[in-house]
Image (cartoon, rainbow, N blue to C red):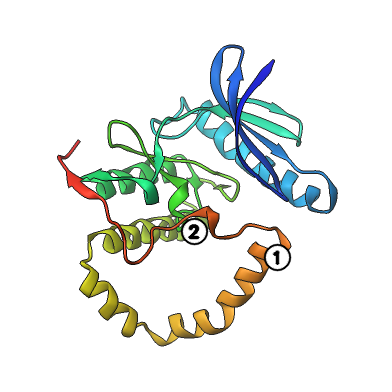
Amino acid sequence: MFRLIEVLKQDDLGSIEYGTLDGCEVIRRGAAAGIMGPIARLLLVREARALGRLSADGGLSGIAGLVAVNGRRELFRSWIAGVPLHRADVLPENFFELLAELAASLHARGIAHNDLHKEPNVLVQPDGRPALVDFQLASVHGLGSARLKRRAAEDLRHVEKHAARYRLRDSTRRSQARERGVVARVWMATGKPVYNFVTRRVIKRPDHEGRRPRGGPWPEWGPRV
């Protein structure tokens, strides 16, 4: 029996809830009904498949294990304590090295996360080590496949972008913003407004998904872990 403690997120795709299942701390993801139901169930199945592959391989530290699946309507995964990257006050000096290693370990098991550009999907655990959550867009591949290699490269590219952004001084950030490339400027002028319309108006996912503001405050750097 699931006992609800806190609703962490609720939108047109469903809910994410923190609670206990048979006395163990878990996260419950429930797929929404209605017009967004088919998409919500598809995403839930993708997450269940990826986490199920990891659990079958013995699990991976820093990634939740699959606890239970109820058809295409809900899944339960183990709870990982931590704060989202964009809310962390302190990061160990080697945080992004560890994050790249964690992503690489995921890829070595045939799984690509495909959503690492979002800072809330990266947790900072109490000991300073990274964890990954939200596997709705994750994909499972054969080891060595060309598609896995492409998607793994994208995962690691996003890790590198986070690392570069967190290590830059504010003056450098402003300079880079002014020198933004043509492709990035075109995206901001055309693609980004469409993306914002879909996420904010269609599936009602406003900016609460989280990103550390360009002006900070930025976390302090602590000892390596």
Query: Which quadrant would residue 165 be assigned to in this image?
Result: bottom left
**Tag 2: Cα neighbours inside 10 Å, few (<14), some, or many (≥20)?**
few
Secondary structure of the residue carrying numbered label 1: helix
The vertical placement of 181 against 63, above or below, is: below
Outermost residue toward the top? 23
Secondary structure of the residue carrying numbered label 2: helix
Query: Which quadrant would residue 164 be assigned to in this image?
Result: bottom left
The vertical placement of 127 against 181, above or below, is: above
156 sits to left or right of 5: left
Q: CA distance from mark 2 to mark 1?
A: 35 Å
**Residue 207 spot, x, y in % from top left:** 54, 60
- Verify CB contact (< 8 Å) between mark 2 and mark 1: no
Of callouts 2 and 1, which one flags the residue occurring earlier in the amino acid sequence? 2
**Residue 89 spot, x, y in % from top left:** 29, 45
Report which residue position mark 1 lands on.
Answer: 201
215 sits to left or right of 15: left
221 sits to left or right of 132: left
Residue 135: assigned label: none
The vertical placement of 10 against 155, above or below, is: above
Which residue is at 52% across, 58% downward?
A: 147
Quadrant including the N terminus: top right
Quadrant including the C terminus: top left
Q: Amino acid at mark 1?
A: Arg
The vertical placement of 74 against 13, above or below, is: above
Q: Is residue 106 visible?
A: yes
Q: Is residue 93 visible?
A: no
Report which residue position mark 2 lands on.
Answer: 146
